[in-house]
Amino acid sequence: MSKPILKVEDFSVDFWVDGVWYPAAVKMNFELHPGKVLAIVGESGSGKSTTALGLMDLLATNARRSGSVLVKDEDMIKAKGSVLRKFRGKEVAYIFQEPMTALNPVYTIGFQVVETLRNHFDMGPKTARDRAIELLTMVEIPNPEQSFDKYPHQLSGGQRQRAMIAQALACDPGLLVADEPTTALDVTIQAEILDLMRNLKTRLNSAILLITHDMGVVADMADEILVMKDGFTVEHGSSDQVFNRPTHPYTKELLAAVPKLGSSRKRELKVARDAAPVMKMENVTIEYPKRGRIPAFTAVKDFSLEIFPGEIVGLVGESGSGKTTVGRAAIGLLPVKSGRLEIVSKDITKASQKELFPIRRHTGIVFQDPASSLNPRLPIGESIGEPIFLAKLAKGDELNRKVEDLLEQVELPRSYRNRFPHELSGGQRQRVGIARALALTPDLLIADEPTSALDVSVQARFLDLLLELQDKLKFACLFISHDLAVVDILAHRIAVMQDGRLVEVGDRDAILKSAKDPYTQRLIAAVPVPDPAEQRKRREARLAAR
Amino acid sequence: MIKQKKKVEDSLVASGENAIANKEVEGLSQGQIIVRRFLRHRAAVFSVFFLFSIMILVFSAVDSQFGPIRTNGWWKWNPDDIPELRFGDCPNDTIGCPTISVVPKFLGGDGFGLGDHPFGQDDIGRDYFSLVMKGSQRSIQVMFVIGFFAATIGTIVGAVAGYFRGVIDNVLMRFTDFIITIPAVIVGSVIGSKFGNLGAIVLAVYLGLFAWTGLSRLVRGEFLTLREREFVDAARVAGASTRRIIFKHILPNAVGVIIVAVTLLLSGAILLETALSYLGFGVVPPDVSLGLLINQYQDAFTTRPFLFWYPGFFIISIALSINFIGDGLRDAFDPRQKRRITKKEKLAAKVMKRESV
């Protein structure tokens, strides 16, 4: 067996907060051999990123490390700053989650690759440039010669992530630490980046430490998996072992919570399609008006969709496809430029704010970011009660009672009425968001990526709750998401959007099993499945199709 | 060993996202968090006490009047009294030297004592302590009036421009730019020579009408970001009116920026008042202010420097403590502000660790 490139023994990280050391990672033990991929999986707050950054002492000043981290037989815990600097980038390179913030916006990507090269090697500018272009070619950036002189903002998200990989690979590092490398990317681009990382790994024989919360990505990449919870290692084993024969209850729970595409429970489709639709869009075009020198931008073109009472319609698309714009227009937050938009059989295409007021009673919206969707200065009871108060349906004690009933409905304790948003976890905040949206028992609920900021186990509970409430209250729902697996669980019908246009709409099974449009097919093929064997099959099929 | 691990697990029970980062703010409301962070800033807390003591001293020592409110002072002289000028027992044959003594007897001084004229007397014998107190009263009043008007106008202009954007924003901001281009001293001197004789408060109101520009830009920026937050959309969907959105949802969230900016504006205001009075465009005799006192006795600097020191000391200490308070408030309102670990705490933690093993 070859010598491990990274050997971690009894590695712990603690943070100093308010007079006490809080452990973030406890007694980690693992090793990594060249050409292998170790995935550290866990939900937010489990300490996976802390571990990754702690290896090379990249943590905040209030962190303390102990144990040993051996990279090429050198202990990174005892190492001095100068030694650490020599190892960073050269032996251990990092790829971060958000390439837009990880790349310096005022330098060209070529300059940033050259900088890494010249920091570690005695290299002239000319040779460094040639090597950088070679690297950019290797990560498959189109026109590497021209891209060398481009700034990060001039590249697309996927290309930026490629540039960052080129920078990380500049010194042929033995170990590549990828901290959520594809979380910010769309599925089709994620698939490409993962393919690229797999190719490079076999070509350069370097090891990859992959940090992620996405079990699909893990199934796609990992040889070995380490599951973390609250700083502790709960399970450590080969990919096959962890996925197919998990031993720890937490791992089982985690795997059960991951939504799997095409394996959702069969739900009764009892939707009255002959009734009048709750929402009706006919050839709707939505435009962001011209502002200063920025020309007008048409976000949605010629969009038609009907939602019937009691029906959940999933609206799927990649970032920038205009799905959020549709959701916001449906609730009257954005004006419609042309076409016709009806909510509960009332035309609101040209409605003013005042005319919209009665419509508001029939609609509710759950926003994407639970951190930003609640006013941090108001107790959550007041946020939930606001729609009722403004509709003049109740006030005083009666309002408080209604708010408490709503809290109970979304399975939060009644006493939470006086809490502030920052005291709640992300999942709880999102429940508060639902409670507020359902305060007036609307006929139409818009859910704009309500689970994209949540952990999988929280997401699973949230989706269960949403289904339960929908069963009870029978509202129609437009569920906007980029995650096909989530939509698969919920939706009766699925609509697919690309570049502001509706590509395809149809019953869930029709779309997922026999999509006609090539874009929908590509989208479905790119979704990683949390099962290593199945994922390998899908990957090979996808590569063969290309 | 097992026991220790149990302990660690216990401390992690309340985990979740950012559990560790949130440990500090568990179970506290926004206001409490801010107060806690403010109390951590020692210089700011000290400045609050210091400023309050100065204000109590200044407003209780001699008669003061602000609008209909009148108070009587406990000090035996008033600025209008002209007691006998002290000769002879001053060093270097000067006249009216300060009688205050702070050097204790065992160090060879005269012990603590105020004497008849703690800050000395001016040319005609008026008690300088009462003059400085009166001058400080004026300067502080002027400061607060400027602050009040500048804060109100700045907040309204900034809020309206930031919330409505578009044409309204353009018009208001170009108007703000126009006001900014006029140097404060020129504005002040024109106003001073025009309205200075109407009294210090009228002058302060007019100065306040020109001091709001920086604040309005800050508030506008804050509103521009806050109005894009999803809770504002949520309020709009709930059917909230524009007024309700501005006052109930956005303004309370912008209050941090406003408080910090206004505090710093106050220290600027007191300096502006003294500068103008020093130049002779601000408060005019027979009224007194700190800047005016310095102006009147600048010739005496070489012979009787105490006529310079005492008003100077009050200007500096008021401006400095307000600046410190502003600094502390900014730290308290800034959510990114994390506490640094002191050496002492690190050491304590090390000891704790050794004991627990």
Image (spheres, rainbow, N blue to C red):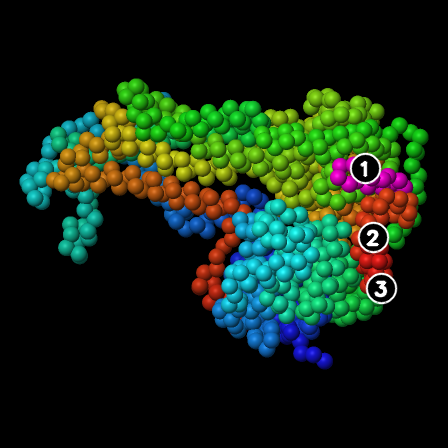
Question: Residue at point 53% right, 49% down?
Answer: A106
Q: How many labels does the image show?
A: 3
Which quadrant would residue B23 be assigned to in this image?
bottom right
Question: Residue at point 33% right, 32% down?
Answer: B272
Range shown magenta? A492-508
Q: Which amino acid does label 2 sit on?
A: Ala
**Dot 2: chain letter:** A
Up/down of A22 relative to B200, above or below: below
Q: Mark 1 points at which residue?
A: A502
Q: Is residue B282 visible?
A: yes
Q: Name the residue under label 3.
A: A533
Residue A26 percent across, percent down from the top left: 64, 68
Upstream in sequence: badge 1 or badge 2: 1
Question: Residue at point 80% right, 32% down?
Answer: A303
Upstream in sequence: badge 3 or badge 1: 1
Which quadrant would residue A320 be assigned to in this image?
top right
Residue A460 percent across, percent down from the top left: 79, 51
Q: Mark 2 points at which residue?
A: A525
Look at the magenta stretch and give its main secondary structure: strand
